Image: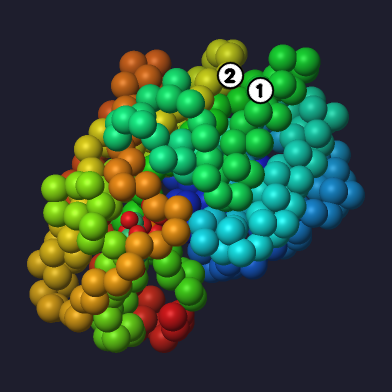
């Protein structure tokens, strides 16, 4: 089976490529290396090109006979999306639309899409099912939800079938530390905390301590990247068996507050780094937790790393390796 992985040189995409490679899939990675890295691509062929280059993409589809596309390539920083909405709508929406159109034109009818819990905005209930109304509150979430809508409509008028996976807070790294998050400008809580523990940052800011949660800080559902990759493999099998389009949440169904994560990072690293309590970050819902019963029931998804300590440990091993190699600097 030949699979196109867009964004396969990035954090989650590179874990996908690793697993597909280990399972013997034929892989082509399409990545402009804007945030991805060549050496994160452990298997397959890497095409360094931009999704905006529809001609290049179309040529690729005509020379390679793809069976499926897994579309990771996107911008993912929420507050940047508020400052630069055009950048997000262009890359996350327009480029995805081009890609989907090229799939339809070339009869590639299996599509897996990286969606996000950000489509829910600030939900009325903390635990969200896929039927909770999508009301994104920033261009990042909106651009992702627009792609879901396009997929839905195109799947009704063509042979295209898709699975949209709504990721909650993805963290952790390959257990052998071959790959992991490599963003120069880390924004995610666990990575920022680990960099504070490594002394690469002076401190960690806690964005808001006055939320309506038990300890006043936001609660999130952190999921290990490898469990998320398993969900993609199951989605690929599901589409390959001829099943129809679905949307699934990917999270563990329980959450941790910012303070709990910070305490766990301190425990795992053994470093009591400096923490500052600052104001709220714009657009943060107080709590966001996945109801993942649908993917468990329909795809038989069984997470194996539902353990915050394991998530942080794998991320810590990776972060130490990365900084020893002197690579990123935040
Ligand atoms: N957060 C924080 N300090 C940081 C980064 C994040 O307090 O340096 C908080 C953030 O406000 C949110 C939670 O940690 O409540 C998770 O944020 P992250 O950016 O990791 O993921 P998001 O939930 O925004 O996708």
Q: Residue at x 74, y 52 (%)?
A: 90
The answer to whether mark 1 is within 8 Å of ligand 1 is no
Location of the C terminus by quadrant is: bottom left
Rounded to the nearest angstrom, the CA distance separating label 2 from label 1 is 8 Å
Compare marks 2 and 1 and give the one earlier in the sequence. Answer: 1
Closer to the camera, 295 or 64? 295
Q: Is residue 244 left or right of residue 260?
A: right
* 197 over 28 or under it: above or below: below
Q: Nearer the viewer, mark 2 or mark 1?
A: 1
Quarter of image, res 22: top left
Quarter of the image for the N terminus: give it.
Answer: top right
| Residue 223 position in % (x across, y down) | 31, 45
In the rendering, at what x and y percent does residue 267 appear? Answer: 10, 67
Residue 40 versus residue 234 in the image, above or below: below
The residue at 45%/21% (across/down) is: 131
Position of residue 82 measured from the top left corner of the image (x, y, whole percent): 58, 58
Helix, strand or loop status at disc 2: loop
Residue at the disc numbered 1: 152
Residue count near mark 2 (Cα–Cα under 10 Å), binned few <14, some 14–19, many ≥20: many
Q: Position of residue 133 (x, y in %)?
A: 48, 26
Closer to us: 200 or 66: 200
Q: What residue is rendered at 81% in x and 36% in y?
A: 102
Q: Write down which quadrant ligand 1 falls in.
A: bottom left
Residue marked by disc 2: 245
| Color theme of the render | rainbow
């Amino acid at each position: 089976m030949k699979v196109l992985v867009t964004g396969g040189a990035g954090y989650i995409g590179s874990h996908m490529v690793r697993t597909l490679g280990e399972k013997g899939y034929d892989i082509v990675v399409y990545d402009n290396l804007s945030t991805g890295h060549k050496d994160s691509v452990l298997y397959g062929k890497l095409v360094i090109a931009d999704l905006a280059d529809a001609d290049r993409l179309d040529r690729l589809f005509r020379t390679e006979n793809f069976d499926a596309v897994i579309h990771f390539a996107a911008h993912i920083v929420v507050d940047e999306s508020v400052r630069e909405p055009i950048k997000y709508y262009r890359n996350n929406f327009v480029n995805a639309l081009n890609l989907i159109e090229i799939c339809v034109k070339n009869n590639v009818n299996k599509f897996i899409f990286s969606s996000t819990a950000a489509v829910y905005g600030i939900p009325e209930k903390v635990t969200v099912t896929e039927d909770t109304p999508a009301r994104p509150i920033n261009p990042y979430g909106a651009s992702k939800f627009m792609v879901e809508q396009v997929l839905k409509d195109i799947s009704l008028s063509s042979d295209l079938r898709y699975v949209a996976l709504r990721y909650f807070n993805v963290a952790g790294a390959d257990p052998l530390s071959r790959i992991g998050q490599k963003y120069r400008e880390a924004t995610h809580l666990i990575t920022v905390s680990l960099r504070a523990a490594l002394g690469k940052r002076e401190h960690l800011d806690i964005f808001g301590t006055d939320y309506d949660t038990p300890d006043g800080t936001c609660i999130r559902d952190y999921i290990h990247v490898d469990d998320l990759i398993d969900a993609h493999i199951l989605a690929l099998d599901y589409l390959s068996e001829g099943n129809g389009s679905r949307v699934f949440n990917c999270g563990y169904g329980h959450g941790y507050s910012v303070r709990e994560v910070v305490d766990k990072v301190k425990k795992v690293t053994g470093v009591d780094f400096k923490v500052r309590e600052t104001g709220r970050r714009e657009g943060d819902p107080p709590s966001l937790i996945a109801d993942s019963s649908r993917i468990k029931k329909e795809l038989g998804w069984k997470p194996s790393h539902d353990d915050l300590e394991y998530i942080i440990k794998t991320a810590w091993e990776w972060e130490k390796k990365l900084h020893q190699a002197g690579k990123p600097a935040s």
